[in-house]
Every structure is written in structure tokens, then in C-alpha cells.
Amino acid sequence: MAMRHRIGIAVLAGVCMGVGPAMAQPLLLGGTQLAPENSYSYFGAIMPFAGGRLGSGWFGTVFANYLTYHFQAGYPSEKVGAKVPGFNAGGGYGWQGPSYQLAISGSLGYQYFSIHPYDVVANGQPQPVGGPLGGTVTFTPQIQAHYDFTPMLYVGTMASYSFGQRAYWSRFRGGIRPVSWLSFGPEGVLQGGVNYHIHQVGAFISVALGDGWSVEGEGGVNYSSGLPSTGYGGFSFAKTL
């Protein structure tokens, strides 16, 4: 049975690039991304281990997340919806230099896929929808990198792969930082899995508000293989504790 998911698998955030090296506090993170037929939200924390600091040294992560998506299945085609709560925890190590930051991490997680309807009609016969159903344990390695060409221009990337879902996610950004508290620029996202492939083209803006707070917005066009293009938008925040 062929089916294509309209799904936004977002990475659960790695080390927060651009956080000053003197900051050793835990970092609280949360956000959501919305598009027609799918959404993704997360909330969690990054905690430097003893002797480490944000962006450099050993750190741990813990996150809760909630995913929704729809796809077409059966013949004639029928819309199927999924609700997927989950959580994960892991750790990693970060390196920091005068003009670069690099972090490698891994996490072990659990997600529960609730699909409705469970059965669809294909050629006159009811058949299970297939795909991920029920509880799924997954291991997700991730790499994150940031490089400053000048104090005003930088590039950044994040990439991960979830073995339990056989799904990948990657994001590429080019940033302009006219002042220390503001950055913006273009972004591109590539993601996919067994039954779907998505790419997004858009832009982001990030603002440091002071007292450890920062906020970020993003938006653009979402292209899913075999489906019409749509818009997407997102909002996230970070707070050092």
C-alpha cells in the first residue's frame, strides 16, 4: 500500500549555537511548527555536565514532543490522521573555537503512533493502514555546526537520523547579524522517511531579549512529494536558567 506522510519531523534541538562560552547554566527550550495537515511541538532542556558549559564540553538533553500529521491511503484515496506524543533523553559533546562551534549527540526516545482510521478500503477490501503504529523506540544521532565568516555573516546546519522510524531531518541556514542581539536570513530543510519526502524553503529571524531570553520565528513554503505545496510557520524560545 503506497502512502505519503505530510509530516514535520523537527530535531529536538542540540547545543544552542551562539550562546556565550561563559554561560554554564541549563538551557530551557520550547517551540512549535505548523503547516496545513501537520504540526510539531517540543519542550525540554539542555544541561551542561560538571566542568562543561553551553557550546563546549559534555551535556545532557531531555525533551517531550507532540507530532500530528495526515496522509492519503487506500483506493479510492482516504485521508488518515496520526497523533504522536513522545519523549527522549540523551547526551553529547560540544567543541567551540574563535569562529566555529560543533556538537555531536545522541538520544534514546519513545513515541506512540495513534492512527485514525486504522483500516482503509483498497480495491474493495479493508486493509490496515500500515506504517508506524503503537509504541516505537528510536535512537537518534545528531550533528550541529556553526561557522562565523565575519562578525556579521555566518552559516549553520543541523542533521539527524531516527533509526526506529527510518527518518532523516536536516536544516541549513545562512545568517546576517547586523547587531549582537538580532540575526536573520534564509533557511532550507530536507526531511523524509520510508513513505514521504519533504523540503522547505524559507527564512528565519532570531532576537535576544536579555536576561537569558531569546525568541525565533521562521516561515516559508513546504513542498511534499506527490502533494500540493503549502506554507509553514514556526516559533521557538530559549531561556538560560
Image: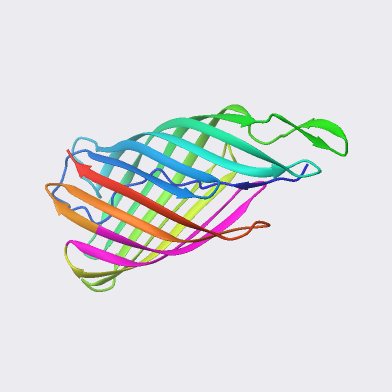
- Report the front residue among 233 and 31: 233
Magenta residues, as a range? Answer: 181-206
Residue 236 lies, with reference to residue 175, above or below; the image says above
- Report the front residue among 197 and 92: 197
Residue drawn 41% across the image and 51% down it: 143
Q: Quadrant of the N terminus?
A: top right
Residue 176 lies, with reference to residue 14, above or below; the image says below
Quarter of the image where one finds residue 165 = top right
Q: Quadrant of the C terminus?
A: top left
Residue 225 lies, with reference to residue 27, above or below; the image says below
Is 103 on the left-hand or right-hand side of 47? right
Residue drawn 68% across the image and 30% down it: 117
In percent of width and height, residue 182 lies at: 21, 63
In percent of width and height, residue 110 lies at: 49, 29
Residue placed furthest toward the right: 124
Quarter of the image where one finds residue 220 = bottom left
Instruction: Specify whether residue 182 is painted magenta.
Output: yes
Main SS, magenta residues: strand
